[in-house]
Image: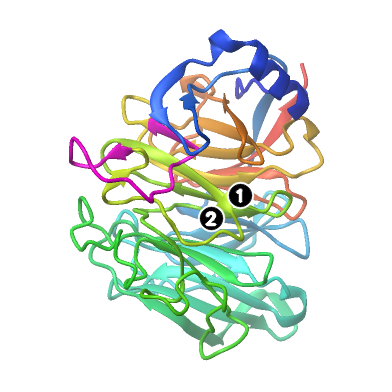
């Protein structure tokens, strides 16, 4: 069982946050909310139990809820998408791109998929993967006529190709924003310390979050309000200065975009900004969050600091982004943003209040109960939460009311 300790409600959490001061140990890392970051704390109350949904998958990298049913679509690193229905893997894959996908590198492979917001009408779906030449590809396709359980391979079309310079830092997570535009996270292309200098180069779309209109243009159009439209820099870019942003997501209730970024040597960071506020520079490779990279001092003026970061001092080494819980079965944790660490296996959540108040909750299970190398946290169409690991397992997180 996860020994996650969570509040009975967000209101109780915020009250206790003010009352239990000694349990919030300040660190020497500063966030963008104007104060020091708290060490993760716990609040007595409830716990979560992981319930095994399915195993036998091949290195799952993404879990996406079917917008039309209670099934799950699971991306496998090698290049397939499998459908999980009531704990059973349907034999025929939704799509099989293994002949196209290069997955031998640690961070290569098929990395994500997303359904178009109007999938029920247009049957359109998007995939992000590394091709056989080592180039990242964003492609779109449509399901077969009369059969939504399989992609019609004839409809596959390339939307965007991103040159890579190694097998690492491919990123490639996606979401559709409130405006219907597709947002995609892109890593710096690999190499220790960003040797290509992509992080601070706005004329290159590596190391960025891009925002594009996939319903217009050939193969896409640029939204007029993107921050670099009419300015120096790639017009697709919405934010930059990122190393390997793994699993960006958008919370429609608050209008916040969550951008976790895997660090190099020093720290892991979680950035959170308003969906209407583009142009942020998150600092890589001048800095890792609020810590200078490979230098005693550095100029971080103009950088957006993370709301939370943790050091590589036994706490972990690779942040795995998740999302904000908005399901109905666990109202006590409504509004928590969940994330994990790939190397150590803990799960934590951050609670934000309009970017003015926050608390980090440590939901870490005992070491023997950890769930392997967590690769992603996903949600079904009802907003319920699932954790997948590279060992091929998917767990649903359920509330244990003690």
Which residue in the structure is indicated by mark 2? 62
Q: Along the horizontal axis of the image, is 116 left or right of 266?
A: right
Asked whether residue 118 appears in the rendered view, the answer is yes
* Residue at 18 percent of width and 58 percent of height: 195
Q: Residues within 10 Å of mark 2 (few under 14, many from 20)?
A: many
Task: Pinpoint residue 68: horizontal percent, then vertical percent.
Answer: 78, 65
Task: Pinpoint residue 115: horizontal percent, then vertical percent.
Answer: 64, 69
Q: Secondary structure at mark 1?
A: strand
Rendered image quadrant of residue 166: bottom left
Q: Secondary structure at mark 2?
A: strand
Q: Which mark is residue 147?
A: none
Check the picture and name the quadrant holding the N terminus. top right
Task: Pinpoint residue 37: horizontal percent, then vertical percent.
Answer: 47, 27
Q: Along the horizontal axis of the image, is 355 left or right of 172?
A: right
Q: Is residue 111 above or below residue 204?
A: above
Rendered image quadrant of residue 9: top right
Rendered image quadrant of residue 276: bottom right
Q: Is residue 202 above or below residue 298?
A: below
Q: Which mark is residue 378?
A: 1
In the image, farthest residue toward the front: 301
* Residue at 57 percent of width and 73 percent of height: 225
Asked whether residue 92 appears in the rendered view, the answer is no
- Which residues lie in the magenta part? 291-310
* Residue at 38 percent of width and 51 percent of height: 302
| Label 2 – label 1 distance at C-alpha | 7 Å
User: Does the CB distance between marks 2 and 1 fall below 8 Å?
Assistant: yes
Instruction: Kindly report the secondary structure that dominates the magenta region of the rendered protein.
Output: loop
Check the picture and name the quadrant holding the C terminus. top right
Counting residues from the N terminus, which is met first, the one under dot 2 or under dot 1? 2
Q: Along the horizontal axis of the image, is 293 left or right of 10?
A: left
């Amino acid at each position: 069982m996860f020994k996650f300790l969570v509040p009975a409600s967000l209101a109780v959490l915020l009250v206790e946050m003010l009352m239990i001061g000694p349990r919030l140990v300040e660190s020497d890392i500063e966030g963008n909310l104007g104060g020091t970051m708290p060490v993760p704390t716990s609040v007595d109350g409830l716990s979560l139990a992981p319930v095994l949904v399915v195993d036998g998958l091949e290195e799952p990298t993404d879990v996406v809820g079917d917008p039309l049913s209670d099934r799950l679509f699971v991306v496998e690193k090698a290049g397939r998408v499998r459908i999980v229905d009531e704990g059973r893997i349907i034999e025929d894959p939704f799509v099989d791109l293994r002949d196209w996908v290069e997955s031998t590198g640690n961070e290569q492979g098929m990395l994500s998929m997303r359904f178009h917001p109007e999938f029920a009408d247009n049957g359109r779906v998007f995939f992000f993967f590394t091709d056989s030449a080592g180039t990242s590809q964003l492609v779109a396709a449509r399901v077969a006529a009369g059969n939504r359980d399989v992609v019609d391979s004839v409809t596959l079309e390339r939307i965007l190709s991103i040159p890579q310079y190694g097998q690492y830092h491919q990123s490639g997570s996606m979401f559709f924003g409130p405006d219907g535009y597709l947002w995609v996270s892109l890593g710096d292309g690999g190499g220790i310390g960003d040797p290509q200098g992509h992080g601070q180069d706005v004329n290159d779309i590596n190391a960025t979050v891009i925002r594009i209109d996939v319903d217009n243009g050939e193969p896409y159009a640029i939204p007029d309000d993107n921050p670099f439209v009419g300015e120096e820099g790639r017009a697709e870019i919405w934010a930059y200065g990122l190393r390997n942003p793994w699993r960006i997501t958008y919370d429609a209730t608050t209008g916040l975009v969550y951008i976790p970024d895997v660090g190099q040597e020093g720290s892991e960071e979680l950035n959170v900004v308003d969906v209407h506020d583009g142009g942020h520079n998150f600092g890589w490779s001048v800095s890792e969050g609020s810590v200078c990279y490979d230098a005693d001092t550095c100029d971080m003026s103009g950088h957006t600091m993370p709301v939370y970061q943790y050091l590589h001092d036994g706490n972990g080494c690779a942040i795995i982004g998740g999302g904000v819980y908005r399901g109905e079965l666990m109202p006590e944790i409504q509004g928590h943003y969940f994330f994990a660490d790939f190397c150590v296996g803990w799960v934590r959540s951050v609670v934000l209040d309009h970017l003015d108040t926050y608390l980090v909750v440590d939901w870490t299970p005992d070491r023997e109960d950890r769930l392997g190398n967590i690769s992603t946290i996903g949600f079904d169409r009802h907003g319920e939460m699932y954790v997948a690991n590279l060992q091929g397992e998917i767990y649903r997180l359920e509330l244990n009311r003690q």
